[in-house]
Amino acid sequence: MKGLVSKFYRVISAIAVVAVVLTACDTPSTLPYYNTPDFTPHFLTAKEANTAITHRIAPFEFKDQHGQTVSEKTIQGKIHIANFIFTSCGSICPVMTKRMKLVQRAFENNGNVVLLSYSVTPWIDNVPTLKRYADNNSITSPNWHLLTGKKSSIYTLARKSYFAEEDIGFSRDSLQFLHTEHILLIDRNRRIRGIYNGTLQLEAEQLIKDIEELLKEG
């Protein structure tokens, strides 16, 4: 009898889990999906997003401040946050780095959250230069990568994958200097889920809340 009761409760528990999953799939996300460089928000269920949202961050491969190769495999199945800086910048970059440090602090021990800071002057920001920048700015998380590589590859990824300068940047000449205060939030499937002004404290705080929401999506 006890065995039958135990089996009954296991079945009920399994049904409850399936019900929760199905409900989540049928409920629109609280965070929008972005499919185009004009950042039109789409509030969709997970099932709808799988077919309606076709834009993904393209594959990439760069070196970080430790000389390690970082690619789309590094962020596979993980949430990542991206911004674009250069180490000699004296205007918005130091502020953006300060805001990114808030994210570093909030998810320091969470391997499912990765920070990517792409250099927009990679011909200057080689691996040793990025390492000095990291040391000078107390960038200590193993999940925060400062990236350098071929300029054209970084700029193409920034403009065509991350829509870093929105619709203006998408069609801008690839040789024109890239400088943006935007921080982008990307989900586990390399889909854009948020855009934030990296110079503002409140935006950084909202970014942290939205990362927490994405982590719940599983």
Image: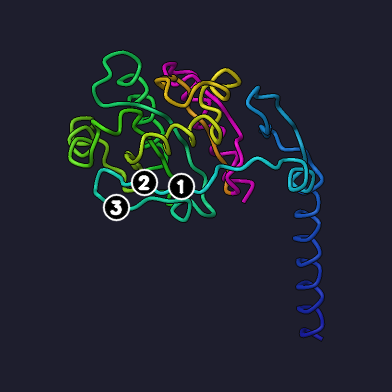
Looking at the rendered structure, which numbered label has been put on residue 82? none
SS of the residue under disc 2: strand
| Amino acid tagged 1 | Phe
| Amino acid tagged 2 | Phe
Looking at the rendered structure, which numbered label has been put on residue 68? 3
Q: Which residue is mark 2?
A: 62
SS of the residue under disc 3: loop
- Residue 94 in the image: above or below residue 44: above
Image: magenta residue range: 189-218
- CA separation in Å, label 3 and label 2: 8 Å
Callout 3–callout 2 Cβ contact below 8 Å: no
- Dot 3: within a 10 Å radius of its alpha carbon, few (fewer than 14), some, or many (20 or more) residues? few
- CA separation in Å, label 3 and label 1: 14 Å
Q: Quadrant of the N terminus?
A: bottom right
Percent position (x, y) of residue 49?
A: 74, 43
| Horizontal relation, residue 181 to residue 68: left or right | right
Q: Nearer the viewer, residue 115 or 162?
A: 162
- Residue shown at the point (25%, 33%) measured from the top left: 125
- Dot 2: within a 10 Å radius of its alpha carbon, few (fewer than 14), some, or many (20 or more) residues? some
**First in residue order: circle 3 vs circle 1:** 1
Looking at the rendered structure, which numbered label has been put on residue 60? 1
Q: Nearer the viewer, residue 182 or 156?
A: 156
Residue 216 magenta-drawn?
yes
- CA separation in Å, label 2 and label 1: 7 Å
SS of the residue under disc 1: loop
Q: Nearer the viewer, mark 3 or mark 2?
A: 2
- Residue shown at the point (45%, 35%) measured from the top left: 82
Callout 2–callout 1 Cβ contact below 8 Å: yes
